[in-house]
Image (tube, helix red, strand yellow):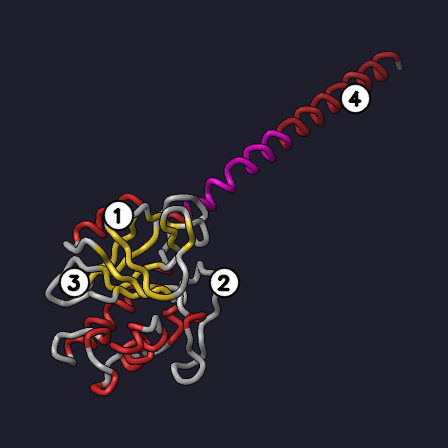
Amino acid sequence: METEMKTQRTTSRARGFTLTELMVVICVVAVIVALILPMLAAAKRSSGPNHCENHLQQIGLSFRIWEGDNGDKYPMQVSVTNGGAMELALTGDVAGIFRTMSNELSTPKVLVCPQDTKRIAATDFAGGLNNSHISYFVGLDAEDKYPQMIISGDDNLEVNGVRVRPGILNLSTNATVEWTTERIGKFHGPSNIALADGSVQTTTTLAFQSALVNTGFATNRLVIP
């Protein structure tokens, strides 16, 4: 009888020790999961498709197709009477520029960056499209003969610490220009620009400033939606 009771006490202590170990293991695993999951999520975002960049690639291609059909000129260099958007661009009407390219763009959904939570895509190019449905600026002076000119890009910019406003932005190469945190979740980039040669670049703030210098122009005029 005494031997049986000792065996039960020993078994009980063994079970208690095992449960304690199990609880410790569970706690350790929970801590590890809590640490790893955010890292995995961040890795997935960084390695996954850049949807803003994808949309900008479609926009850049649309510009190229349009200028190929219009004497190697972009809509900003062709008057409205000739089917372009020159006068609209000079008033800061970004929507008017993209409306001119509606056939090439196919859908207004590409004009909104998926990471831009402040905007909702328009349902059509007719009466519904305005600057509030657009996430990308347009380079007013971009020309096919200057392949490094910036033709479009993410509009989440600030200059000298001030968020850019809708309209024409005269951006000198010595200005302090930075990407804001609205879409990228961290200060100083990266975000995206499209060049007149058809390429799209994901750039940090410093790389964007270098791109402004590479255009060869002391001042780059951007139309901000």
Pair 2/1: label in front: 1
Mark drawn on residue 12? 4
- Disc 3 residue type (three-letter): Asp
Q: Could you tell which of marks 1 and 3 lies nearer the N-terminus?
A: 3
- Disc 4 residue type (three-letter): Ser
Real-space CA distance between mark 1 and mark 3, rounded to the nearest whole angstrom: 18 Å
Mark 4, secondary structure of its residue: helix
Residue at image mark 3: 197
Residue at image mark 2: 118
Q: Residue at x 29, y 66 (%)?
A: 138
Mark 4–mark 1 CB contact (< 8 Å)? no
Please state the horizontal and vertical placement of residue 169, each as a whole percent of the image: 32, 60
Mark 2–mark 4 CB contact (< 8 Å)? no
Q: Is 92 rendered above or below residue 28?
A: below
Residue at image mark 1: 209
Q: Could you tell which of marks 4 and 1 lies nearer the N-terminus?
A: 4
